[in-house]
């Protein structure tokens, strides 16, 4: 059996947090219309319950992302790697800010735009993270 290393734990925590943050947004996006039709008052309760899990996952993503960068270094990486990393970090900022707008917004437009941009940013950051890991 292979033995896990600190790098395994670091990357595993990062991927687990991404699964909660990104996967949760996908699941909620799919469930909310049905939940709203069945029990309109429940959507806020479910969204707040998810937020209690999602925001700590986002914080873990940021912390393990910083840990990843410190562990692997990036100054000696190719320009293409650095550009990809920069775009990923911008998308991380977009997803966090947009999710906050979605959660704190009062208008339907703020919730819709925040939710859509939050998910798109999360999907983009996830994809670019996978690209950085695989080196493709």
Image (tube, grey):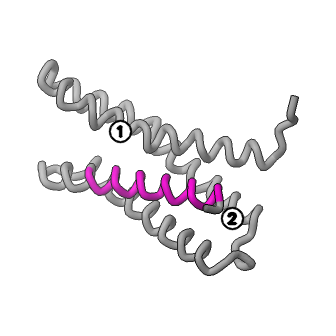
Q: Secondary structure at mark 1?
A: helix
Q: Residues within 10 Å of mark 1 (few under 14, many from 20)?
A: some
List the residue tagged with mark 1.
Answer: 26
Residue 101, located in which quarter of the rendered image? bottom left
| Of the pair 80 and 64, the residue shown nearer to us | 80
Q: Residue at x 12, y 48 (%)?
A: 108
The relative height of residue 52 versus residue 88 in the rendered view (above or below) is: above
Residue 47: image x %, image y %?
30, 34
**Region of the chain picked out in magenta, as a range:** 116-134
Q: Is residue 127 magenta?
A: yes
Q: Earlier in the sequence, mark 1 or mark 2?
A: 1
List the residue tagged with mark 2.
Answer: 69
| Of the pair 82 and 101, the residue shown nearer to us | 82
Residue 10: image x %, image y %?
72, 48
Give the left or right position of residue 107, taking residue 7 as reference: left
The relative height of residue 57 versus residue 41 in the rendered view (above or below) is: below
Classified by dominant secondary structure, the portion drawn in magenta counts as helix
Marking on residue 48: none
In space, the residues marked 1 and 2 are separated at their CA atoms by 27 Å
Q: Residue at x 54, y 50 (%)?
A: 59
Can you say which quadrant of the picture contains the C terminus?
Answer: bottom right
Q: Residue at x 74, y 42 (%)?
A: 9
């Amino acid at each position: 059996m292979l033995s896990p290393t600190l790098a395994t734990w670091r990357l595993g925590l990062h991927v687990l947090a991404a699964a909660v943050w990104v996967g949760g947004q996908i699941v909620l996006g799919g469930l909310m219309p049905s939940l709203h039709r069945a029990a309109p008052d429940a959507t806020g309760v479910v969204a707040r319950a998810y937020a209690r899990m999602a925001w700590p996952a986002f914080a873990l993503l940021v912390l393990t992302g910083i840990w990843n960068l410190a562990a692997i270094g990036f100054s000696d990486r190719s320009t293409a790697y650095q550009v990809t990393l920069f775009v990923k970090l911008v998308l991380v900022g977009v997803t966090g800010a947009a999710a906050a707008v979605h959660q704190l917004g009062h208008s339907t437009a703020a919730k819709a735009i925040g939710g859509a941009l939050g998910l798109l940013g999360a999907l983009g950051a996830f994809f670019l993270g996978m690209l950085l890991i695989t080196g493709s």
